[in-house]
Structures are given as structure tokens and as C-alpha cells.
Image (cartoon, helix red, strand yellow):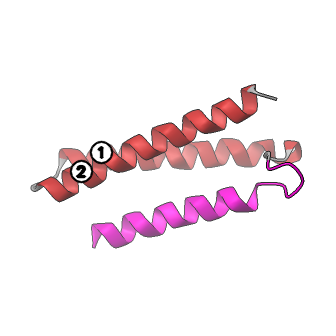
Amino acid sequence: MPFLITGTIIGAVLAGLVCSISPEGGDVQEKDATSSFVLGAVVGVLALLGLFLAAGAEDGVFYATGLGLFVFCVLFIFGMIHRQVGR
């Protein structure tokens, strides 16, 4: 069950990312800067969810899933920062 919830949340975040990318150059549209902050906040909450999942794990699968979700979210946020600073 946690895998289904985690997969659904990650899918929703990635769908929001795809919708906020412009077809011209692949950069996030400047007029939607607010959506970038909201997306960053949602991914940050997902990172915390991953840490709580890993902390409460009773077996190795949930522990690895929680840490994997955390690492993915942190790298995703760093990528968002890199795109914004690189302009």
C-alpha cells in the first residue's frame, strides 16, 4: 500500500513538472515562477515523507524506499535550483 501511495504522489509531481515546461527551449516558463515554488514545496514535503517512511520502517524494503524517495527529491530540488540560477 505505501508503494502505491508513493508512486501516485511521485507521478503527480512529475506530471506537474511536465506541464510547467515550455515546448520552445525546455526551460520553466518565467511567468510561472510561482508554480516552481509550489512544486519545490511539494517535493520538499515528499522528501520529509520519505525520511519518515525510512524512520518507521520495519524491513529493508521500506527503509530503502524511504531513503530513495528522499534522495530523489533532494536531487530534484537541486535541479530546480540549477535551472533557475543558470538563466
Q: Residues within 10 Å of mark 1 (few under 14, many from 20)?
A: many
Q: Is the Cβ of the residue at disc 2 closer than 8 Å to that at disc 1?
A: yes
Q: Amino acid at mark 2?
A: Ala
Q: Amino acid at mark 1?
A: Leu
Which quadrant would the N terminus be assigned to in this image? bottom left
Residue underneath mark 2:
64
The stretch drawn in magenta includes residue 8: yes
Q: Residue furthest top?
A: 85
**Alpha carbon of mark 2 to alpha carbon of mark 1: how far?**
5 Å
Query: Which residue is rendered at x = 52% and y = 66% of the image?
Result: 11
Q: Residues within 10 Å of mark 2 (few under 14, many from 20)?
A: some
Residue underneath mark 1:
67
Left or right, residue 85 beside residue 15: right
Query: Which residue is rendered at x = 66% and y = 60% of the image?
Result: 16
Q: Secondary structure at mark 2?
A: helix
Q: Magenta part of the protein: which range? A: 1-26
Left or right, residue 39 beside residue 59: right
The spot of residue 73 in percent (x, y) is 47, 44
Q: Secondary structure at mark 1?
A: helix
* Figure check: 22 above or below 8: above
For residue 37, what is the image quadrant? top right
64 or 1, which is in the foreground? 64
